[in-house]
Image (cartoon, rainbow, N blue to C red):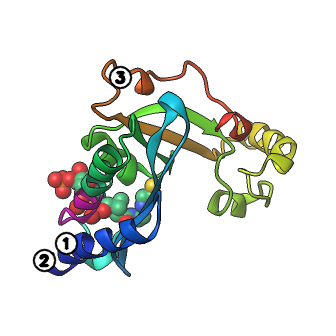
Amino acid sequence: MVLPCRVVSCRASTQLAANHRLVSAGGPRSPVMGKAEGTGENWHGHVTAITVGPEFRRIGLATSMMSWLERVSEHVYNGYFVDLFVRQSNAVAVGMYKQLGYSVYRQVIGYYSGEEDAYGTCACCCRSAAHNHCCRAAAATFMLIGIMMIGTDMRKALPRDVNKKSIIPLPAPVYPEDVD
Ligand SMILES: CC(C)(COP(=O)(O)OP(=O)(O)OC[C@H]1O[C@@H](n2cnc3c(N)ncnc32)[C@H](O)[C@@H]1OP(=O)(O)O)[C@@H](O)C(=O)NCCC(=O)NCCS
């Protein structure tokens, strides 16, 4: 546990200095990547990817990396919240994020392609506006037969969002073209 944690703090400062609004930390087997994005009250830190090598799991590394990314989002970028997308089917990650204080902001139907597509959904990138029509149709079809390809957008408000407006959940699912 000691080695990866030292790598986090060391590489974090290097990457921060090198990449405006883009941050990463962790070793090759346990990285986290993120960025700052949005405008106005939508200015926030975004977790692009986080993974921990199987041999390092369950010793608090993801918790440490998420904590680091939240501190960067707050103290370096002064964001209103931190958000991330996770497959609805990824119960371990969803459970971890909830434990870290994240809540579901919205469900995005057709956000993911990839593994779920191996069962036969459209093979395009569902985040591409050019393929929205295809994805919307595929999402409807595969929801009908019970194969979900839903992205769960989870958020955690930062102190700048005094009234926690950013985490008020949307009442209904949205589609990729609705995600800014
Ligand atoms: C999800 C993942 C990043 C967690 O990394 P980790 O370093 O093992 O997580 P932590 O040790 O910080 O665990 C934090 C909490 O998450 C939950 N958790 C983590 N792994 C779990 C598991 N296998 N089963 C149940 N709960 C789990 C626990 O509540 C845990 O707290 P606890 O150990 O005090 O009970 C890791 O399993 C992983 O890389 N998975 C594959 C990639 C992935 O799914 N990334 C997220 C995509 S959005």
Above or below: residue 61 compared with residue 43: below
Tell me the quarter of the picture where residue 16 sits: bottom left
Q: Do the residues labelled 1 and 2 touch (CB within 8 Å)?
A: yes
Kind of residue indicated by mark 3: Lys
Q: Which mark is residue 66?
A: none
Spatial CA distance of label 1 from label 3 is: 31 Å
Asked whether, in this view, residue 53 is left or right of residue 85, the answer is left
Secondary structure under badge 1?
Answer: helix
User: Which residue in the structure is indicated by mark 1?
Assistant: 5
Q: What is the secondary structure assignment of the residue under circle 3? A: loop
Q: Residue at x 60, y 22 (%)?
A: 172
The residue that appears at 32% across and 75% down in the rendered structure is 54
Circle 2: element type: helix
Give, as a single range, the part of the protein colored magenta: 58-65
Quadrant of the picture in which ligand 1 is shown: bottom left
Question: 109 or 8: nearer the eye?
Answer: 8
Write down the residue under mark 2.
2
Real-space CA distance between mark 1 and mark 2, rounded to the nearest whole angstrom? 5 Å
Q: Which part of the image, by quadrant, shows the N terminus?
A: bottom left
Q: Within 10 Å of the Cα at label 2, are there few (<14), some (14-19), or many (20+) other Cα atoms?
A: few
Provide the residue designation for mark 3: 164
Q: Which amino acid does label 1 sit on?
A: Cys
| Mark 3 vs mark 2, CA separation in Å | 35 Å
Q: Image point 64% across, 52% down: which residue?
A: 112
The percent coordinates of residue 168 (x first, y second) are 44, 21
Q: Does the magenta stretch include residue 101?
A: no
| Residue drawn at (79%, 59%) of the image | 124
